[in-house]
Image (spheres, coloured by chain):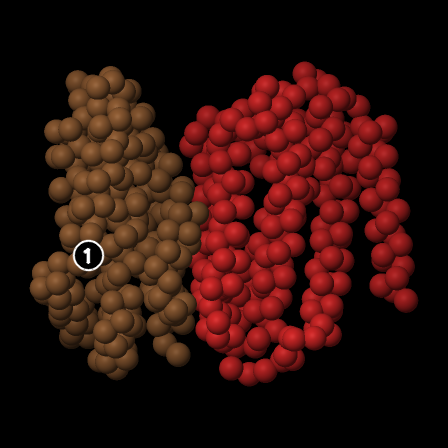
Chain colours: A red, B brown
Amino acid sequence: MGVLVLKIILAFWMALVTIGAFVYAPPALGLGDLARIIFFHVPLAWVSVLAYLVSMIYSIRYLKKGMMVDDRKAALNAEIGLIFTVLATITGSIFARFTWGMFWNWDPRESSIFILLLIYCAYFVLRSAVEDDTRRARMASVFSIIAFISVPFLVFIIPRVYATLHPDPIISVESGFQMDPKMFQVFMASLVGFTGLYAWIANIVSRLSAVAPGTEGEENV
Amino acid sequence: MGRIFCTSLRGVWALVKKDLVDELRTRYAITSMGLFALTTLVMVSFSTGIFALDAGLHASFLWIIVFFSAMSALARSFIKEEEKGTASTLRLSASPEIIFTGKLLYNVILLLGLIVVVFPFYLFLMNLPPGGNYALVVVFLIIGSACLAGATTILAAMVSRAGAKNSLLPVLAFPVLLPVLLTAIRGTSIALAGGKAGGVSSELTFLFSYLVIIVTASLLLFPFVWED
């Protein structure tokens, strides 16, 4: 019952976030109504990195314990992460079109999310290339860890080293928080809402994969 | 402690020597890599050599040639062990860490050899803008190819374990190496335009820290790839 209540709360929460994003939050200085996209774009980007992080943690767990279920969860989280990354790329590209004039112009942020997309496409290519189950799990886990190592370089270092046009509302050290309090409330609420949504999707997908035919149960390797 | 270090060092050296002797006998990797580099270089030179290109374009061409030539050779480093059936013997005769270090060093030597061939040819065939800081370009080529080898060695081992699919390596290596390539291209283009070492310190730091992190992680993860 507790879970059901949580789901209902999440549904209302997301509805409130959507309404708040368009009605409650004031338009930003300079960007105007275009700035409203941060209530969706930034949480999507946050969830995509989070899903990859969870995927890597499951990969490490697989390498330590050798349980097939961990490998399957790592793959599922990477899939969810890939979807969220695609959505973050699309929303970011819409923003780019209406502020910088082009859908795509290889801004450091755009390059880094493009590389993130490529990394996880390569992850699925690798998974499909290996026949043997155990070996696939091992190779995919190692690749996931190797690939995740470059994520901090992409997300935090490249945009610091190279000049970017990308607005930097949450992880900027120099400017700190310079958001309108109302915008900030909606923004944080949206982050929480999207994280909850991700947790729910991950839960559904992992339960589904446990009962779907063709997947073996837990086994020791 | 000191003795263990010395024995491992000797093991690494034996492996590098074995690979080099093997390579000099067959010359498969050297010739294929060299000819690949030459073909690409001639194509680039043929189509753009008459134009005065700026430093950024030269840096991109140089790194594209180095990256794809390197991929054709580095994939061989573990696949050849599987093909000849020597992988199991290798697995028995040395610890995974020694094998990884040996293969890494061999790959670095291979890439340095590639650069020794490609860079002079590039200078010869393309008319580079005058006033470039060539010492700094060489520094970028060396540290960049060390990064290439560092990330590719474990991936090559994975490819050899994934049924030796040759074309898989560029697919896996490209996204992992893109941060390195972007940074190396940027640094090289600044150096070609005559920049000083102080102007590219952030690029050098980036490449160096990437190298240290990726080699450490590969060393830790290699036993999972290598052993059954």
In the displayed structure image, the side of residue A31 where residue B186 appears, left or right: left
Look at label 1 and name its amino acid: Ala
Classed neighbour count for the residue bearing mark 1: other residues with Cα under 10 Å, few (<14), some (14–19), many (≥20): some
Q: Give the vertical position of B212 relative to B4 (above or below).
A: above
In the displayed structure image, the side of residue A83 where residue A110 appears, left or right: left
Image location (x, y in percent) of residue B147: 30, 48
Q: Compare residues B71 and A169 and report the one nearer the observer.
A: B71
Label 1 residue SS: helix
Image location (x, y in percent) of residue B155: 37, 59
Image location (x, y in percent) of residue A22: 82, 29
**Residue position for label 1:** B29
Image location (x, y in percent) of residue B10: 13, 70
For the point 43% across and 47% down, the residue is B175
Q: Give the vertical position of B41 relative to A124 (above or below).
A: above
In the displayed structure image, the side of residue B98 where residue A197 appears, left or right: right
For the point 25% across and 67% down, the residue is B80
